[in-house]
Every structure is written in structure tokens, then in C-alpha cells.
Amino acid sequence: MKKYFYTDGTNNFGPFTLEELREKLITRETKVWFQELGEWKSAGNVPELNEIFKLAPPPISKTNSNFNNMENINNQKPPKTWLVESILVTLFCCLPFGIAGIVNAAKVESRFYAGDINGANRSSEDAKKWTTVSFWIGVAVGVIYLIVVMAGAASKF
Amino acid sequence: MLQVNFRKFIKWSIALILVSILAIFYRTYNPTCNIYFPKCPFWELTGFKCPGCGSQRALHYLLNLDIFSAIKENAILVISIPYILAGLTFDSVKKPNEYILKWRKTLFGRNAIVVILTIIIAFWILRNIIY
């Protein structure tokens, strides 16, 4: 019969049988040890103890908390800011839309590095919208202008 | 998959052809003495230059490798070319490492964008005062 030990960090308890261990209200984070394990391991990581936790709720996930986000965020690529495209739009086509794009690019950056990933994605969509709109306005204005000038030139003949 | 790639290929080919035609057009004709180039509506309406005024003429001079004339027409366009190329390069990196991300944040982060906006607006005001 396997003998299990567990520790609260300072004191070790045991030996217990699996049945006894079940009574001890250990959690997935409790360090446990038995001969075959070699070293202390979190009980949640020991497959044969899984059935103890079957009825226990899972630990509260920390991945959604701001703290963990802040740690990961510096290793991630922010969503596309459309900064370069907005600058080109400002210089070649539609000043107000270009400025709106640049402001949204700034929002993407500040929201992303503040941990507001959803907000950053929304601003990215906004920036994309403004650049796309102004790109097609630019194309349309150019084409219409060309047609008008050509019609004017043609009517002179 | 093949069909998607083919469609992409066609799309980019058409874009490339259109850009080439435009480039030849802008290289050959000087917007200053030609009526086929659209004029800036801001200038037409207010009599003031906008930050983009002169960019078509600057493009014409750039394509003819006359950088000094291009700077005279629209300095901010010429100055921003290396920055724009760098930005496109940074954008095209799919999985950047920590080092690239750090540089990206410095050059294209929020503070950098605020500086750019300030430069554009300062240029807008100054070019109307000085000339």
C-alpha cells in the first residue's frame, strides 16, 4: 500500500493511505510526496490524486487578472495600429481622416499597454475604418477630378 | 488554398500594375504645370496650406531623384519616408522577439505617436507663417 505525505510548508504530515489523505482537505496546490514521486509536487499535478479533487472546484484562474496580463503584455505584439497608413493618408489625401487615424493609433498603443486588450482591438478596428474610408475617398476624388478635367478639355475641341 | 493564393496573386498584381502606372504618370508630368492632378481642397477653400500640400509635386521630384526640390515642396513627406519604411518593416514581422518589440514600442508607441502629431501640426502652422 502506498504511503502519502503532505506538507503545509513547515510541517510534514503522514504517512497516510489514499483514503486517509482524502479526509485531509488538501488542495491542488498542497505539496505531496510519496516514495515513487522522488520530490515534493503539487497535488494537482499528480495524476493518481486527481480523483480527490474531482468534486473540488478548480482554482480561480489568474490569467484574467490585470497582474498576469501586465506580465505577458510586454512579450506580445499589439494589434495593428495603422499608424503608417494614417500618416500617408494625412499627407496624400484626407487630412481630417488621417488625423483621426493617428489619434486612434495612439489609443491602440495606450490601451494595449494598460492591459485593455479588447479596447485596443476596438481602436485598431476604428483606425482601420478611417484609413480605408479615406483611401477610397482619395481614389474616388482623383478619378472624378480626372473625368471632370478630361470632359472640360474635350469640350474645348 | 490554391484558389485563395491565386486570388491574392491577382489582387497584388493588379495593385502593382496600378501603382506602376501612377508612378510613371507622376514621374513624367509635373503637377505644377498640369491640370490633371487634383488640388488640395483645404488650400482651395481657405488659402492656407495643409500638411499634405505639395506632396504630389514632392512625389514628382522624388521619382526624378531630385531630393532638394522635393524637400522644398513638402519637407515632412521626404523626412517621413525612412520612418514609413521602418514602420512597414516592423508591421510585417509576424512573431517579433522581445528586442524587436522594445524598439517597436520606442519608435511607434504612444509617445512616438504624440510626437508625430505634434510635428505634423507644428509643420502645418509654420509653413503658413514662414512662406
Image (cartoon, rainbow, N blue to C red):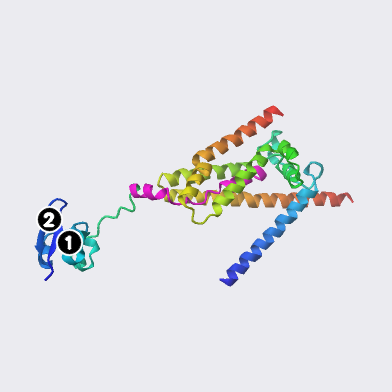
Quadrant of the drawing holding the N terminus of chain A = bottom left
Crowdedness of circle 1 by 10 Å Cα count: few (<14), some, many (20+)?
many
Q: Amino acid at mark 1?
A: Trp
Q: Is residue A25 left or right of residue B59?
A: left
Residue A133 visible, this orientation: yes
Residue A111, picture quadrant: top left
Q: Is residue A144 above or below residue B44?
A: below
Query: Do tags 2 and 1 sit on the same chain?
Result: yes
Q: Secondary structure at mark 1?
A: strand
Front residue (pair A118, B102): B102
Crowdedness of circle 2 by 10 Å Cα count: few (<14), some, many (20+)?
few
Q: Is residue B99 above or below residue A49?
A: above
List x then y, in percent, for residue A76.
44, 51
Residue at image mark 2: A12
Residue drawn 63% across the image and 51% down it: A135
Front residue (pair A94, A115): A115
What span is in magenta? A67-94
Q: Is residue A37 above or below residue B87?
A: below
Residue at image mark 1: A33
- Marks 2 and 1 in Cβ contact (< 8 Å): yes
